[in-house]
Amino acid sequence: MKKLFKKILVPLAILLATLTLSSCKKYLDRSPLADIAETDPYKNFRNFQGFTEELYNCIPMLSGNEYHSSWNLGEEEFWQVGETRVIAYAIDQGDYRAWESAYYNFFKADGGDPSNTDRFKKGRLWQLSWYGIRKANVGLANLDKLTDATQEEKNLIAGQLYFFRGYFHFVLMEYWGGLPYIDQVLPTDQVIKLSRLNYQQTADKVAEDLQKAAELLPVDWDQTQAGKQTTGRNSQRINRIMALAFLGKNYLWAGSPLMNRESTGSSDYNPGYCKKAADVFAEALNVIESTKRYELASFSQYREVFYTWNAGGKLPGLKESILLENLTEASGRWRYNQVNDYRPNTINQTGIKVYPTANYVNYYGMANGLPIKDLATKDPESGYDPEYPWKNRDPRFYNDILFDGEKTVVRAQSVGNNEYRQYASLFTNGLFRTADDNKKVWTGYLLAKYISKLSNEFDGYRDNNTCVMSLMRLADVYLLYAEATAVGYGSPQSMAPGYNLSAADAVNKIRNRAGVTGVAEKYLGSTADFLQELRRERAVELSFEGHRFNDLRRWLLLTQRPYTLKTAIEFDRATPNAQVYADPVNAKVRNLREVVLFERQLGDRHYWFPFRTQDVNMYKEFKQNPGW
């Protein structure tokens, strides 16, 4: 692995070289760091924690790369036609090698120096993950030098290092599959030939590290003696719950169809790994519910889980977020650029435009918990009516999606008196659907999950936004528990030992928060039927949060219709405009239909990313993924 880590080792080599400088002839010619002994970074808790802090800068950044960000790679978004710079375009085309080069891309292999103050050089998943693994190994190799510390302080340092070593392997595995597990400081003067493990073998190694982390770390740093020095500023420090949550996710991924196929040849779930996942999630949820360290936000505060506006840079997430993405310049990166991407030029005059696909919005079913079977067909069972398609929908639909007739500006003067700019003109041939050529609203919907529906630039709604993605939040843990328990223990009614919620109960807990009726009886007769609704629930609750692509991959659905389609809706207004604007939810439409904008042509090789050619050419034991 010599070449693989060559760039990663440079910053550390420079630091160590500096620390061991020999004395110079003149005192004034010496570097201030020349008097620092090689053991100084590790000798006490304060120093060692300073060394460890850099690992937090290696956490991936999804939502702040190069001014615009593209992190939803499933079937949920449609970018403006001809926009080839975003990684989502390359994924649509099946060009997975673009992860190395696409301009708006959180994978990119360059820019991996976590000490760089340029926020656009952070967040690169590939480079920083390998750097983080190396740094965690350096720290673990020097634990014996931590002599001036209490046992609590030693546990805190070791727990963070074990977590990050496991976590960074896991985020790489999600996209590239089984890896060599790097659990030592690799020498720089030797050729290393470490074979790739299969996915489940690598996951077992990850599990060992995350389990150690969970045993060493506290639930809340504020309750530790060491953490009292930074009371109130410890919310993002790695804790026991984070370690358990990712341990459970690691086991569930290892038991999912794609990963099981890569490891064993079977395309079914692996119940053994799913049972392990269910047990760990149950442990995590017991700790969460007994300590209230994390809690589901009330639906009245749901927006604050995802973004804050005009709140002095306050981070979103409330007590629901467990681990946030990289926080570099969090209060400033969602201004002027990304925030403009979600509205057409008729409102915001800049930006690369991206809109929710109609096929994805269809997952938002009815408030009674039932799905929409066919957008164009009336359904007496669910109550869906294609003449009133926005009526009685899941409340999260109204939170996340901006639809035809909704007001889009604060004051009419800010966009003139043109009603089709004041109110979303998303019907066929409406202004939003026809203006601005390739930046028009292709799909018939706008996104509102990360930006106010009243978002025109003239009233300052593009300023003072703080949006930080949750890499793990509590709602996700409940849904992961539900999936792992239903598969691992055999039914929607199953419970993991020692926990009081069944798989179905866990899904209903998330639905109830939003005011949606629980999973219908018709989906509780078998695990297969239940998984159908659970997957739809994940699509809705975790919409546009970067989970969908990996979910479709691990379920072996990425290449299957209808998940390959990206569609738009077309319809005519049947209610007078004034009434539409007064009550868009109950507006009547005619000729509602869905049209295909694009279909992905993907094959089996697209379930895994390719490694860089330079890496797989290092030695024969480091093999390329199939088909690449």
Image: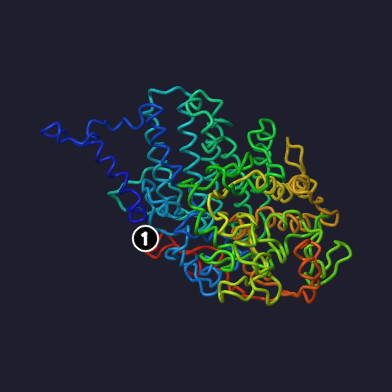
Extreme left residue here?
25
Specify the quadrant of the image occupied by residue 398: bottom right
The percent coordinates of residue 361 (x first, y second) are 70, 63
Give the side of residue 582 with respect to residue 68, left or right: right
Give the image's coloring scheme. Answer: rainbow
> Looking at the image, which residue is at 56% across and 76% down?
437
> Looking at the image, which residue is at 62% across and 74% down?
599
> Looking at the image, which residue is at 38% across and 36% down?
51
Quarter of the image with the N terminus in it: bottom left
In the picture of the structure, the residue carrying the numbered disc 1 is: 619
The percent coordinates of residue 539 (x first, y second) are 68, 57
Q: Nearer the viewer, residue 179 or 64?
A: 64
Q: Nearer the viewer, residue 109 or 348?
A: 348
Across the whole image, how many numbered discs are drawn on residues? 1
Disc 1 secondary structure class: loop
The percent coordinates of residue 557 (x first, y second) are 65, 65
Give the side of residue 331 with respect to residue 426, left or right: left
Q: Amino acid at mark 1?
A: Tyr
